[in-house]
Image (cartoon, rainbow, N blue to C red):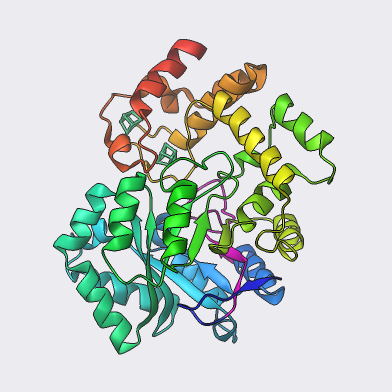
């Protein structure tokens, strides 16, 4: 495993981080984590050198931190840097506000300290709530009393908002979404460089866009990979493109199978900063341009839009929508057909609750209508 050390952090952090937004579940129910398997996978990654493990208060219906706490027993806690996140928009309605949520987290995680602590999903609107609650002064206090070692934020909004938040506090680190398709989306490469110039290390989420850049690869992109001098899988190209950036501290991968852990460890064991040639970077950029020309809705399967009051599984519908626009094949029609009628986009009432929560700002209700027109 490769490790990167930044002045602000002062300890080596593994280039591969374990994200727990997509732990294995039982019966397809997000809140029903397959605990034994999840713990086995997390520990396997740690045994193989991963030392950055990332969770959040709201992942898997609030159960991720609990499972994580159990995974880090038996001396695994001492071998890892634990990251979790404060959902300030939920803390506003918690009787104990920020402190109440934090206390819940420490209890679930079975620890008295969080190493990397992030204000979760900061957007224009959520940043206002964070300030309303005195989030920055609270972080100061937590850093001072040692309950938080390093303070950061995770981000989903435009570049202007990113710069504003970066400039607002003495952050130890931050977390952004970055992959070769989203190089100029949200904070993007410009945001990455902005943080880098201030010496703020960056944690990367969605390096393969929720796995979408590694499967159902369009012919034009596959031809690029096939004709490249180095023989690498799509996932490997995607991860290496992110790891190539020296501003990146760790790359989060939501690994839910042993094969993914093995593959990611293999790739990131020698993916040093600036290790890709200019030609290789240009090749991956070209793949990004092809994707951007094909994919209509930049959904990352983050599930923030859920639950839908009509029980539509929105990320699955987004998958069908994008795959239809890339391939126009029968697979997407078949996937739509397999969706129970009472959960199809035709039951959408256009309430747009989902859109308020979507960090990608997707016009979900309009997309539901388009799906109805395409498939019904
Ligand atoms: S707009 Fe449609 S998809 Fe979105 S929450 Fe409302 S019913 Fe569900
Ligand atoms: S529609 Fe938006 S909120 Fe829902 S999964 Fe996709 S990106 Fe996330």
Rendered-image quarter of ligand 1: top left
Say whether residue 302 is left or right of residue 265: left
Q: Which residues are magenta?
A: 12-35
Q: Residue furthest left?
A: 132
Q: How many marks?
A: 0
Could you say which quadrant of the image residue 222 lies in? Answer: top right
Quadrant of the image for the N terminus? bottom right
Relative to 124, is 12 above or below?
below
Instruction: Answer yes or no: is residue 376 visible.
Output: no
Relative to 225, is 31 above or below?
below
Instruction: Answer yes or no: is residue 142 visible.
Output: yes
State the image coordinates of residue 35 (x, y, percent, origin top left): 57, 65
Say whether residue 136 is left or right of residue 157: left
Say whether residue 205 is left or right of residue 219: left
Q: Residue drawn at (47%, 47%), measured in percent from left and top?
A: 188
State the image coordinates of residue 292 (x, y, percent, origin top left): 55, 29
The stretch drawn in magenta includes residue 17? yes
Could you say which quadrant of the image residue 332 lies in? Answer: top right
Q: Main secondary structure of the magenta part?
A: loop
Q: Residue drawn at (56%, 24%), measured in percent from left and top?
A: 293
Could you say which quadrant of the image residue 60 lies in? Answer: bottom left
The stretch drawn in magenta includes residue 266? no
Relative to 5, is 217 above or below?
above
Of residue 72 and residue 337, the one placed in the foreground of this image is: 72
Say whether residue 230 is left or right of residue 146: right
Of residue 149 and residue 275, the one placed in the foreground of this image is: 275
State the image coordinates of residue 63 (x, y, percent, origin top left): 44, 62
State the image coordinates of residue 32 (x, y, percent, origin top left): 50, 55
């Amino acid at each position: 495993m490769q490790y990167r050390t930044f002045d602000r952090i002062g300890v080596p952090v593994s280039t591969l981080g374990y994200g727990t937004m997509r732990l294995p579940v039982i019966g397809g129910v997000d809140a029903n984590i397959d605990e034994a398997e999840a713990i086995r996978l997390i520990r396997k990654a740690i045994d193989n050198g991963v030392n950055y493990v990332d969770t959040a208060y709201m992942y898997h219906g609030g159960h991720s931190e609990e499972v994580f706490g159990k995974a880090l027993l038996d001396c695994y806690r001492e071998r890892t840097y634990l990251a979790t996140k404060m959902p300030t928009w939920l803390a506003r309605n918690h009787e104990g506000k920020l402190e109440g949520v934090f206390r819940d987290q420490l209890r679930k995680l079975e620890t008295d300290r969080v190493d990397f602590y992030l204000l979760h999903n900061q957007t224009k609107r959520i940043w206002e709530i964070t300030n309303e609650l005195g989030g920055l002064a609270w972080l100061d206090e937590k850093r001072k009393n040692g309950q938080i070692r390093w303070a950061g934020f995770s981000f989903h909004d435009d570049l202007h908002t990113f710069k504003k938040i970066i400039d607002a506090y003495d952050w130890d680190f931050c977390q952004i979404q970055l992959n070769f398709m989203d190089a100029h989306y949200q904070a993007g490469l410009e945001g990455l460089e902005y943080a880098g110039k201030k010496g703020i290390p960056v944690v990367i989420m969605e390096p393969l866009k929720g796995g979408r850049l590694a499967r159902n690869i369009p012919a034009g992109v596959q031809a690029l990979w096939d004709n490249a001098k180095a023989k690498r899988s799509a996932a490997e190209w995607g991860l290496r493109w992110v790891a190539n950036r020296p501003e990146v501290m760790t790359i989060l991968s939501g690994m839910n199978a042993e094969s993914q852990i093995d593959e990611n460890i293999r790739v990131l064991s020698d993916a040093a900063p600036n290790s890709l040639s200019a030609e290789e970077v240009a090749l991956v950029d070209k793949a990004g341009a092809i994707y951007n020309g094909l994919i209509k809705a930049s959904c990352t399967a983050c599930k923030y839009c859920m639950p839908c009051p009509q029980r539509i599984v929105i990320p699955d519908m987004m998958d069908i929508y994008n795959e239809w626009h890339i391939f126009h094949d029968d697979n997407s029609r078949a996937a739509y057909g397999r969706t129970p009628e009472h959960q199809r986009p035709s039951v959408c009432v256009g309430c747009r609750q989902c859109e308020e929560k979507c960090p990608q700002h997707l016009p979900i209700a309009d997309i539901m209508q388009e799906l109805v027109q395409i498939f019904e």
